[in-house]
Image (tube, rainbow, N blue to C red):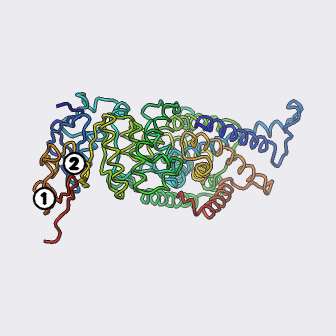
């Protein structure tokens, strides 16, 4: 089968899965909705639940999950390391701290429609990735061990700052900022969905347009550049796109880990490592995954809602361990 | 002389360390050029400058009389292929997929490989003798086989010039002679110009073509391989007593470590 046919087939299957997940998630919840009856016969409360809460939340979950997974795939390609992701490189931590600082400083205004919270989040994440990158470079080459260590250390530092801020917050404030520690998709209305999509979708499209470059890049800087790739330009584009995309999501949802790490990983095992397949499929599978985990988080002990970050980390972590233990012969990491 | 690449007063340094000093060089067309020198003498750097991966601090590199830095990177990739000393494969692509990456300069950003690209990739694997590996994962084959895959990828680029950095490094005797015979075939049958940096001064390689001896980033001697490669020159550039043993056309080069 040619790559083109494989791409169409896999994307079709993943889209069907995504659609099924969307339908299920729209109907499931504390307030059950029957989606197969006439829309016009929906009661007022049903409409409010559908349009005001559930649809925006599910769209947000899809955008966030898809975006984080694409960021993971792109960062892994750029750092030539399957352990790179917004979470492991400290970008998530940076974005969370940025958002939290803006909230604590009471900066709730907006700049050309974007809240200062998002702007802070973006700036913090781009500074983090540049810092982690420069620390991990030895003689112009990224040392993998240093890279991941620097990312993990930055994450610890950011958690410490975040807990510090949290510790000195009043009780109500601290509840408000809780979501930037645990990750939550608890939004109302569409405005945040559109704002996030406005930044994250173009960033994902930039990454999607670079999948061929990512393949070439996997052959190392010298060979990639002899094959016509402008390494510096490519890296700049990926920094910018991943920071923009991750920050636009995390500034709304808080840190949601694991998706960027393990969605591309599962796909590499199942469909192969070609980024022309991997990146678009990461979006579709990431979107489905976060939507379904979010639905689990709000229904499993309904009406109590568990922050989705906890659920993704649990499911993702267990799944990852299972993969790791079961695939000892196929060592990819 | 009919040359394809010309280096004109090339100098290069990494931060403060001068690596390449005032190198003037003509790479003859459809011939083999060996670049020989001790470790750290600047061979790899010189190769990267000749294929435009690195830009010289001063001086020029010309490809077919055009300044190489004025040519689009993608256009260079269709003319000059480069095989690194230690090939990097960050992700477990199949051997076939890696060889197909050699076609990427010919494929647009949103295009897929055409039938002709697949045929060229198959042919390249055939030339190198790795067709039986094509569906294997690149991380599951030996270091020597990886080197062969890199060579096949470079052949798939259909270049005029191929630049190889220590292609014999990871190879056992069988694979080494296989790779050197492939190189001979590329010159004789496809008219490629080939530049090899190496320590491994093999009989097959010095029987034809020319050699450039490097010492401290400068050209120590250059000319026909059979003239340049002798005990006194090699002893000088390796700074040790080098002996050459002959058996007909076959030669063996060894450092005298006994006294």
* Residue A17 appears anywhere in the view: yes
Q: Are marks 1 and 2 on the same chain?
A: yes
Q: Is residue A318 above or below residue A203?
A: below
Taking the image as shown, residue A34 lies to the left or right of residue B113, namely: right
* Residue A105 appears anywhere in the view: no
Of residue A13 and residue B210, the one placed in the foreground of this image is B210
Label 1 close to label 2 by CB (< 8 Å): no
Q: Residue B227: percent from the left, percent from the top? A: 13, 47
Chain at tag 2: B
Taking the image as shown, residue A235 lies to the left or right of residue A85, namely: left
Q: How many neighbours does mark 2 have within 10 angstroms: few (below 14), some (14-19), or many (20 or more)?
A: many
Chain at tag 1: B
The total of numbered circles placed on residues is 2
Q: Residue B118: percent from the left, percent from the top? A: 50, 36
At 18% from the left and 63% from the top, the residue drawn is B255
Of residue A192 and residue B37, the one placed in the foreground of this image is B37
Q: Which mark is residue A39?
A: none
Q: How many neighbours does mark 1 have within 10 angstroms: few (below 14), some (14-19), or many (20 or more)?
A: some
Question: Which quadrant would the N terminus of chain B be assigned to in this image?
Answer: top left
Q: Residue B218: percent from the left, percent from the top? A: 14, 47
Residue hosting label 2: B206
Mark 1 / mark 2, whichever is N-terminal: 2
């Amino acid at each position: 089968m040619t790559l083109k046919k494989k791409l169409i087939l896999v994307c079709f299957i993943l889209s069907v899965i995504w659609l099924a997940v969307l339908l299920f998630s729209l109907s499931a919840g504390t307030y059950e909705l029957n989606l197969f009856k006439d829309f016009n016969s929906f009661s007022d409360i049903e409409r409010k639940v559908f349009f005001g809460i559930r649809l925006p939340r599910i769209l947000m979950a899809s955008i966030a999950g898809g975006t984080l997974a694409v960021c993971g795939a792109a960062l892994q390609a750029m750092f030539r390391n399957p352990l790179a992701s917004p979470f492991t490189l400290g970008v998530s931590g940076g974005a969370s701290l940025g958002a939290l600082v803006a909230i604590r400083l009471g900066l709730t205004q907006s700049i050309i429609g974007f809240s200062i919270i998002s702007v802070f989040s973006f700036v913090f994440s781009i500074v983090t990735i540049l810092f982690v990158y420069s620390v991990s470079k030895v003689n112009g080459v990224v040392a993998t061990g240093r890279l991941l260590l620097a990312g993990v250390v930055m994450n610890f530092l950011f958690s410490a700052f975040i807990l510090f801020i949290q510790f000195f917050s009043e009780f109500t404030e601290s509840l408000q900022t809780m979501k930037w520690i645990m990750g939550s998709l608890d939004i109302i209305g569409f405005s945040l969905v559109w704002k996030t999509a406005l930044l994250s979708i173009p960033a994902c499209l930039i990454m999607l347009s670079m999948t061929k470059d990512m393949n070439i890049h996997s052959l190392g800087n010298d060979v990639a550049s002899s094959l016509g790739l402008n390494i510096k330009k490519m890296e700049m584009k990926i920094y910018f796109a991943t920071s923009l995309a991750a920050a636009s999501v995390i500034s709304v949802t808080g840190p949601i880990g694991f998706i960027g790490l393990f969605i591309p990983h599962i796909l590499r095992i199942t469909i192969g490592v070609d980024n022309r397949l991997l990146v678009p499929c990461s979006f579709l599978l990431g979107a489905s995954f976060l939507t379904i985990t979010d639905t689990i988080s709000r229904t499993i002990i309904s009406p109590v809602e568990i922050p989705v970050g906890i659920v993704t980390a649990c499911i993702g972590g267990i799944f990852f361990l299972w993969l790791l233990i079961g695939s000892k012969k196929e060592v990819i990491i | 002389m009919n040359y394809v690449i010309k280096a004109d007063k090339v100098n290069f340094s990494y931060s403060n360390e001068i690596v390449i000093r005032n190198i003037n060089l003509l790479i003859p067309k459809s011939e083999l050029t060996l670049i020989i020198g001790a470790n750290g003498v600047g061979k790899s750097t010189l190769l990267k400058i000749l294929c435009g991966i690195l830009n010289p601090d001063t001086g020029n590199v010309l490809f077919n009389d055009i300044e190489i830095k004025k040519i689009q990177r993608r256009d260079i990739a269709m003319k000059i292929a480069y095989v690194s000393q230690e090939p990097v494969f960050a992700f477990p692509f199949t051997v076939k997929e890696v060889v197909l990456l050699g076609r990427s300069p010919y494929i647009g950003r949103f295009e897929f490989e055409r039938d002709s690209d697949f045929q060229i990739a198959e042919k390249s694997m055939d030339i190198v003798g790795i067709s039986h590996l094509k569906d294997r994962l690149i991380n599951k084959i030996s270091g020597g086989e990886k080197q062969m895959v890199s060579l096949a990828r470079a052949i798939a680029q259909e270049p005029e010039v191929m630049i190889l950095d220590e292609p014999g490094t990871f190879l056992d005797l069988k694979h080494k002679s296989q790779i050197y015979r492939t190189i001979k075939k590329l010159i004789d049958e496809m008219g490629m110009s080939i530049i090899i940096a190496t320590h491994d001064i093999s009989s097959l390689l010095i029987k034809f073509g020319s050699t450039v001896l490097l010492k401290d980033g400068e050209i120590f001697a250059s000319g026909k391989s059979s003239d340049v490669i002798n005990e006194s020159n090699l002893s000088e550039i390796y700074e040790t007593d080098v002996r050459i043993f002959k058996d007909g056309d076959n030669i063996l080069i060894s450092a005298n470590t006994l006294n």
